Image (cartoon, coloured by chain):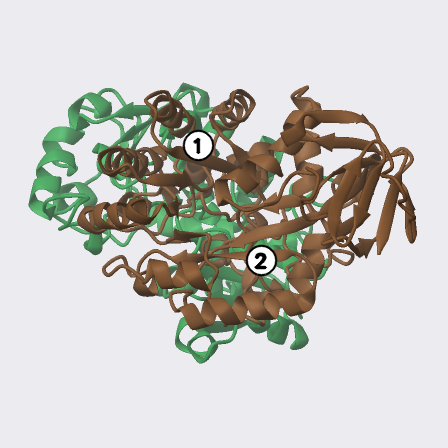
Chain colours: A brown, B green
């Protein structure tokens, strides 16, 4: 199949392309951008007039719920959601049931995902067996099976000796560790930011210090061991400042923020909206402002969806008992665009944060439109508004704090390996 | 976002928390309660305002006292009352809160009185029920206990009608207390100019001053010249751990004794939502002393609960 994408505005952050150009695809690869190659005869022409053509989105954190939690979501539904959101590559955390700490499980997941023929799935293996924080998992075996990095998902490692060893071991082989910074004792039973709103609503708080303390341990040990560490879902102003300092010192550290945290604060909990029960908790206006600054100045490398589908019943409970998480794959692009528009950030810069930057963190060949790279693309209308409606979301998880909101940015075509896998 | 407690005409639809209720509604409840105080003193302690209605006490967390006062209040209004201790029945069989509620709606309950260990449980139910059903929060987690807050200000109004001239101290475990939160909102909404909270830092929530209170850690300084002292109950499980070293030390530093009471205004009143821990937060001589209004609080509690139910049931304007 040879595809000619005509009249679109191409944005390819890696190659600094931001222009009205045509794209030519053959045998699942990008052949050329701009001039039609000699002898190219398209078998399919996509008219991208008034549309943006960019690399397929790369999401650093999307839960697919397989294996084990199929009543919440299934690979089929979530990978449909991914491509409907323009996401063509995604990393999934290891907190499945069973945990992704066995090469066989990873191979099975990769295989089953590939069968769907939709987005590419890159599992993050469990850093420790069963995520228990005591014994290291077989990182090399898991890497061979397809893991692109190792993570503890939302489970903290309380034993700093184990954290140290994990970083030493990962550093030996050049693996990146994906860690969520939350000190578990300070955060115990907490469900909201420990501030004004939690106090008024009578919710147990998670202080900002829980992030700072965990981050201090992680960064210090990373410095000692030379490990490459990615901090998942930063939430506090202090955390941003600590990462900024760590980067200035030359540590091998990167980090992301969830699209939810770029737009919401503790006040969005309003009258106990369980859709705002998220991990980390939504924090203050000041934290949100600093996350934005950090994302602008490059302290924060990427935006993730933190896609966590939850079945409706699990949200129909008092706030603290409602299951954590929100659906996000289909909202990553529009929420990123909304952020860029509000903050007057260029489209090129914003798209970089959900394509090239996240691909670099995962160390995968994706997130750009270089010649001969996989033809994974997202073609969208930046000016078309759509209303977030649980009924029309492809994800099995219908829970999101953004329900009812009108968002700009509608995906029109998604291509994976040169095949149209989604068409609006 | 719409205030879930008020209907489109600004009238009370559910009583979920004091926060978010205008002064007008608080006064309506207090004034209605005033008219119910006398009912209990009659030979026939009943008015027919809720005749034919079914009030369902839905207690997901055990409480004999609060449940009893709601029961009495509903019965004095001639309602039929069902009381369910759900903590010991369906919940232990795995039924969700909303399933339990749906079953009772199917049995034609008109009003739910809900207590639950989790903050926000009453809001969840209020959001779920059809428009003709009313929900009264009888305590949700650490969040709110609005009828307690109302009966406390009702009691204060009885003894100290000049609310605009009062200095009130709330003493003890504010962190875990839904009563304290309700009292603070009720007092500040009704225009009490100075509300103090007195507690060690371990028993105060983050940024408590944003609720509009003055924070004291020194009991003696905090009690100086106050008109009202509202003591809070200290739960047993908080007494020996990371919150507090011991009940003895707590009593020494924050217990209300006759000597400490003398620091307040000479005519200050002492309140407690009950049940009391004598010798932990309050000395028996104070609890039983002449400045104590703890038992009148209980009496007024019934009038307040009658008032809330009558207003929600649509019979507030009726003659008694």
**Which of the marked residues, 1 or 2, is nearer the chain's N terminus?**
2
Query: In front here: A280 or A176?
Result: A176
Residue at the spot 70% in from the left edge and 64% down from the top edge: A117
Residue A196 is marked as 1
- Kindly check if marks 1 and 2 are in contact, taking CB atoms under 8 A apart as contact: no
Residue at the spot 57% in from the left edge and 63% down from the top edge: B112
**Toward which corner of the image does residue A138 lie, by quadrant?**
bottom left
Say whether residue B19 is visible.
no
The image shows residue B301, relative to residue A51, as above or below, that is below
Query: In front here: A24 or A341?
Result: A24
The image shows residue B238, relative to residue B199, as above or below, that is below
Query: In front here: A277 or A317?
Result: A277
The image shows residue A101, relative to residue B219, as above or below, that is below
Report the side of A143 relative to B19 (left or right): left
Say few, some or many: other residues with alpha carbon within 10 Å of mark 1 (under 14 / 14 to 19 / 20 or more): many
| Image mark 2: chain | A
Say whether residue B156 is visible.
yes
**Residue A150 image offset from top left, x and y in percent:** 39, 53
| Image mark 1: chain | A
Q: Total of numbered circles in the picture?
A: 2
Local secondary structure at mark 2: strand
**Residue A121 image offset from top left, x and y in percent:** 58, 58
User: Foreground mark, 1 or 2?
Assistant: 2
**Residue B259 image offset from top left, x and y in percent:** 10, 30
Measure the C-alpha gap from mark 1 to mark 2. 40 Å
Report the side of A353 relative to A388 (left or right): left
Local secondary structure at mark 1: helix
Report the side of B14 relative to A411 (left or right): left
**Residue A328 image offset from top left, x and y in percent:** 63, 49
Quadrant (top left, top right, bottom left, bottom right) of the N terminus of chain A: bottom right
The residue that label 2 is drawn on is: A121
Query: In front here: A15 or B308?
Result: A15
């Amino acid at each position: 199949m040879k595809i000619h994408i005509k009249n679109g505005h191409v944005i390819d952050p890696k190659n600094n392309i931001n222009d009205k150009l045509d794209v030519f695809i053959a045998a699942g690869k990008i052949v050329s951008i701009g001039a039609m190659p000699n002898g190219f005869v398209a078998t399919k022409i996509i008219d991208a007039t008034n549309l943006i053509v960019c690399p397929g989105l790369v999401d650093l954190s999307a839960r697919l719920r397989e294996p084990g939690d199929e009543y919440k979501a299934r690979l089929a539904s979530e990978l449909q959601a991914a491509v409907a959101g323009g996401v063509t590559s995604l990393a999934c955390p290891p907190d499945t049931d069973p945990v992704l700490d066995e090469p066989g499980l990873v191979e099975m997941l990769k295989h089953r995902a590939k069968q769907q023929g939709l987005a590419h799935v890159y599992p993050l293996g469990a850093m420790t067996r069963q995520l228990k924080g005591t014994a290291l998992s077989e990182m090399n075996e898991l890497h061979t099976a397809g893991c692109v990095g190792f993570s503890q998902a939302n489970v903290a490692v309380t034993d700093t000796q184990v954290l140290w060893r994990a970083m030493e071991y990962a550093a030996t082989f050049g693996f990146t560790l994906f860690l969520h910074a939350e000190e578990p004792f300070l955060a115990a039973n907490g469900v909201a930011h420990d501030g004004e709103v939690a106090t008024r609503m009578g919710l147990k708080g998670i202080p900002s210090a829980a992030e700072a303390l965990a981050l201090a341990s992680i960064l210090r040990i990373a410095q000692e061991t030379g490990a490459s560490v990615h901090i998942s879902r930063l939430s506090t102003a202090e955390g941003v400042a600590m990462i900024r300092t760590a980067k200035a010192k030359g540590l091998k550290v990167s980090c992301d923020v969830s699209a939810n945290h770029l737009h919401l604060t503790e006040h969005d909990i309003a009258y106990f909206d369980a859709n705002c029960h998220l991990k980390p908790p939504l924090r203050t206006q000041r934290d949100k402002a600093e996350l934005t600054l950090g994302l602008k100045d490059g302290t924060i490398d990427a935006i993730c969806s933190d896609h966590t589908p939850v079945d409706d019943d699990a949200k129909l409970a008092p706030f603290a008992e409602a299951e954590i998480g929100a659906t996000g794959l289909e909202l990553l692009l529009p929420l990123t665009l909304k952020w860029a528009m509000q903050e007057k950030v260029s489209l090129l810069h914003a798209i970089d944060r959900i394509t090239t930057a996240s691909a670099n963190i995962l160390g995968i060949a994706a997130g750009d439109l270089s010649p001969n790279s996989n033809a994974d693309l997202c073609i969208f209308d930046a000016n078309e508004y759509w209303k977030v409606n649980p009924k029309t979301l492809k994800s099995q998880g219908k829970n999101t704090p953004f329900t009812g909101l009108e968002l700009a940015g509608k995906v029109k075509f998604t291509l994976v390996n040169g095949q149209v896998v989604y068409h609006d | 976002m719409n205030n879930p407690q008020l209907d489109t005409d600004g009238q009370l639809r559910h009583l979920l928390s004091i926060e978010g209720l205008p002064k007008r509604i608080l006064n309506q409840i207090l004034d209605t309660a005033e008219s119910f105080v006398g009912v209990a003193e009659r030979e026939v302690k009943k008015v027919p305002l809720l005749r034919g209605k079914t009030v369902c006490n839905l207690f997901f967390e055990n409480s004999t006292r609060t449940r009893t006062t709601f029961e009495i209040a509903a019965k004095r209004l001639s309602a039929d009352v069902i009381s369910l201790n759900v903590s010991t029945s369906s919940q232990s069989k795995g039924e969700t809160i909303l399933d339990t509620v749906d079953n009772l709606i199917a049995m034609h309950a008109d009003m739910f009185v809900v207590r639950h260990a989790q903050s926000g449980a009453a809001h969840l139910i209020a959001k779920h029920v059809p428009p003709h059903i009313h929900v009264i929060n009888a305590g949700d987690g650490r969040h709110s206990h609005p009828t307690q807050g109302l009966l406390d200000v009702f009691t204060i109004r009885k003894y100290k009608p000049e609310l605009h001239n009062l200095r009130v101290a709330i003493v003890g475990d504010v962190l875990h207390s839904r009563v304290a939160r309700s009292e603070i909102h009720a007092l500040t909404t009704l225009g009490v100019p100075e509300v103090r909270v007195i507690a060690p830092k371990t028993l105060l929530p983050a940024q408590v001053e944003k609720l509009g209170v003055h924070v004291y850690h020194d009991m003696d300084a905090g009690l100086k010249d106050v008109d009202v002292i509202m003591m809070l109950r200290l739960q047993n499980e908080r007494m020996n751990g990371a919150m507090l070293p011991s009940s003895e030390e707590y009593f020494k530093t924050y217990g209300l004794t006759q000597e400490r009471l003398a620091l307040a205004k000479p005519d200050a009143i002492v309140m407690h939502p009950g049940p009391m821990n004598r010798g932990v937060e309050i000395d028996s001589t104070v609890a039983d002393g002449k400045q104590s209004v703890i038992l009148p609080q209980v009496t007024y509690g019934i009038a307040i609960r009658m008032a809330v139910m009558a207003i929600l049931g649509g019979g507030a304007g009726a003659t008694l």
